[in-house]
């Protein structure tokens, strides 16, 4: 029988989750949102039969799993509620507001004996899958160092809404654009983080000329109290190191989404450059491997199929396949916990001006 899935949240990401679940043979049977009008519209657009205004009613139904697509503050409470109801959980990033909440989610997962996964969708990009094969087969060797970037020149997702309200989001680009940090750590073999030193900046965060061409509408009288950019450095217990740069608004040439790494046998890069910030139709994707052969430098381009959704559909499909035992899960909650520990340490280091041990 097909896995029956309910959607919690009628936001824009829902369509990717729905397409992914269906691609893997899952059955999306219901959608719940406190905004019943939005849930009804999403259900009609995506061919979903049932609509709920109360998550408890959805969880009382005969679904097997849920996907959570709501503001960050509600990720942990809803995930725990769903796990306690005996449902598998696929949750949008970030895993939670803080690492402590992920500990609670893991405890609920273990008690329920269900899957808990997060939408770290860049792991499912074709470029990432091909690069991971080269890492796993020994072509790259141990990755000593990596650099993770998701930077924008003008890409604040609205003013006064939940994205810019720390009490609802947990932070700005550090927590919103964590994908490349996650991908770098994934390539590095998910080592355990040891120390973080970081600085955040809030220049431009209230200036409308730095808003992106997408995102939520501005909310008059709302709060904007998050960072606009962050830079820092992570060390791991293995001796590996990672530098990072994440920004919604920073004086750079163009939006860049990339992981560059230096392995013992080869280096590499997975990158997407946006010609116009936030608009995919001018994006340039790159996947390259750098080696030395016979005393000569050899740069290899890895060609993969186009994937404009940046792995979102395949990431959701993997959730269904993992539940059914047809594929290894692309991530687990322990990896989400380590990522949130780093994010907590970034903010703590920025506040104290000192390195933070994890």
Image (tube, rainbow, N blue to C red):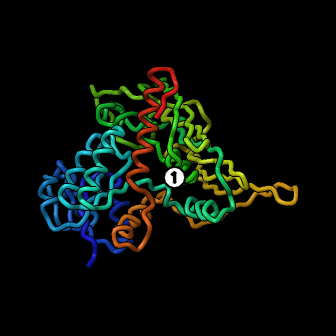
Q: Residue furthest bottom?
A: 1
Instruction: Depth check: give the residue in front, 126 or 251.
Output: 126
222 to the left or right of 277: left
Disc 1, SS: helix
On screen, residue 238 above or below 139: above
Extreme-front residue of the structure: 237
Question: In percent of the image, x 41 and y 66: which residue is there?
Answer: 318
Q: Position of residue 333 (x, y in %)?
A: 38, 52
Residue 62 found in image quarter: bottom left
Question: Residue drawn 41% across and 44% down?
Answer: 214
* Residue 101 placement, left or right of 268: left
Q: Residue at x 22, y 52 (%)?
A: 38
56 left or right of 10? left
* Residue on which the image places disc 1: 280
Residue lying at the far right of the rendered structure: 295
Q: What x and y, as percent, mark residue 132?
A: 58, 60
């Amino acid at each position: 029988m097909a896995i029956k899935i309910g959607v919690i949240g009628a936001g824009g990401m829902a369509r990717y989750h729905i397409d992914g679940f269906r691609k893997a043979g899952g059955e999306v049977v219901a959608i719940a949102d406190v905004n019943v009008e939005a849930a009804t519209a999403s259900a009609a657009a995506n061919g979903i039969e049932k609509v709920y205004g109360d998550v408890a009613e959805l969880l009382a139904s005969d679904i097997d799993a849920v996907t959570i697509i709501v503001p960050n503050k509600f990720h942990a409470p809803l995930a725990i509620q769903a796990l306690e109801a005996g449902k598998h959980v696929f949750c949008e990033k970030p895993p939670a507001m803080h690492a402590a909440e992920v500990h609670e989610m893991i405890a609920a997962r273990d008690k329920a004996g269900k899957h808990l996964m997060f939408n770290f969708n860049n792991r499912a990009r074709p470029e990432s899958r091909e690069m991971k094969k080269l890492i796993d087969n020994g072509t790259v060797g141990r990755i000593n160092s990596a650099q993770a970037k998701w930077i924008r020149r003008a890409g604040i997702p609205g003013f006064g809404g939940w994205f810019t309200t720390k009490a609802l989001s947990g932070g700005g680009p550090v927590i919103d654009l964590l994908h490349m940090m996650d991908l770098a750590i994934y390539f590095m073999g998910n080592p355990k983080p040891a120390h973080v030193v970081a600085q955040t900046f809030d220049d431009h965060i209230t200036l409308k000329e730095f808003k992106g061409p997408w995102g939520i509408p501005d909310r008059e009288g709302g709060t904007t109290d998050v960072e606009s950019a962050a830079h820092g450095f992570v060390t791991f217990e293995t001796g590996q190191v990672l530098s990072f740069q994440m920004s919604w608004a920073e004086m750079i040439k163009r939006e860049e989404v990339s992981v560059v790494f230096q392995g013992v046998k080869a280096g590499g890069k997975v990158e997407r450059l946006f010609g116009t910030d936030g608009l995919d139709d001018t994006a340039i994707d790159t996947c390259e491997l750098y080696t030395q052969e016979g005393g000569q430098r050899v740069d290899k381009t890895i060609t993969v199929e186009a994937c404009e959704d940046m792995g979102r559909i395949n990431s959701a499909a993997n959730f269904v396949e993992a539940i059914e035992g047809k594929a290894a899960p692309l991530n687990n909650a322990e990896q989400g916990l380590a990522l949130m520990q780093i994010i907590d340490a970034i903010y703590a280091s920025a506040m104290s001006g000192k390195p933070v041990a994890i």
